[in-house]
Image (cartoon, rainbow, N blue to C red):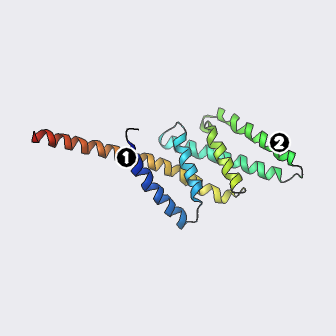
Amino acid sequence: MEHRWQIAISAGLLAGVWAGFADVFQLVTWIGFLGCSTFFAQKEIGVKGMLMAMATNVSGVFWGWLIISGSSFFVSPVMGYTFTGIATAAMCLQASYQKLAFIPGAFIGCCITFAMGGDVAAILPPLLVGAMLGYSMSLLTTQLIGLTQKLQTIFAENTAKES
């Protein structure tokens, strides 16, 4: 990792900002970090990557909600297993659609939904902000890399003049 310091500064600074923001607005911090992680785990970059992270995570939230809601109509746990199997297959099949091609993003959203007992209102805001957090970290890292390169050039030019 060539730009470890720039990444560390960007991630550390914005993670602290996110933690404070989440605390003030009573958002679940760890959900935001999973949205951020989804941004970095999938292959797209920039706004397209942020939207991919959001879309796949939200689709997973939908599938998790569907499993929980659908299963609640039946006494037998077998129906819950059936809904889980169908939703799992659907999360894999939806990857045929390019905007939902990151299968782990869907599974992350689904797992968050299970962990939060299906509380979609508590899940979606930090999850979406988390993807924006990842994008912001990426942008800040790029700016820090550019600044570092400029400073290195200035330092090299000044050193050459002194020689």
Residue that numbered label 2 is attached to: 82
| Label 1 CA crowd tier, 10 Å (few <14, some 14–19, many 20+) | few
Report the amino acid beneath label 1. Trp
Which quadrant holds the N terminus? top left
> As drawn, is 159 to the left or to the right of 38?
left
Residue that numbered label 1 is attached to: 5
Tell me residue 146's x, y (percent).
32, 43
Report the amino acid beneath label 2. Thr
Which quadrant holds the C terminus? top left
Q: Of the residues tagged 1 and 2, which is closer to the observer?
A: 1
Depth order, front residue of 19/86: 19
Tell me residue 142's x, y (percent).
38, 44
Identify the mark at residue 106; answer none if there is no mark: none
Tell me residue 120's x, y (percent).
68, 56
Find residue 95 and report its image quarter: top right
Q: Residue at x 51, y 37 (%)?
A: 44
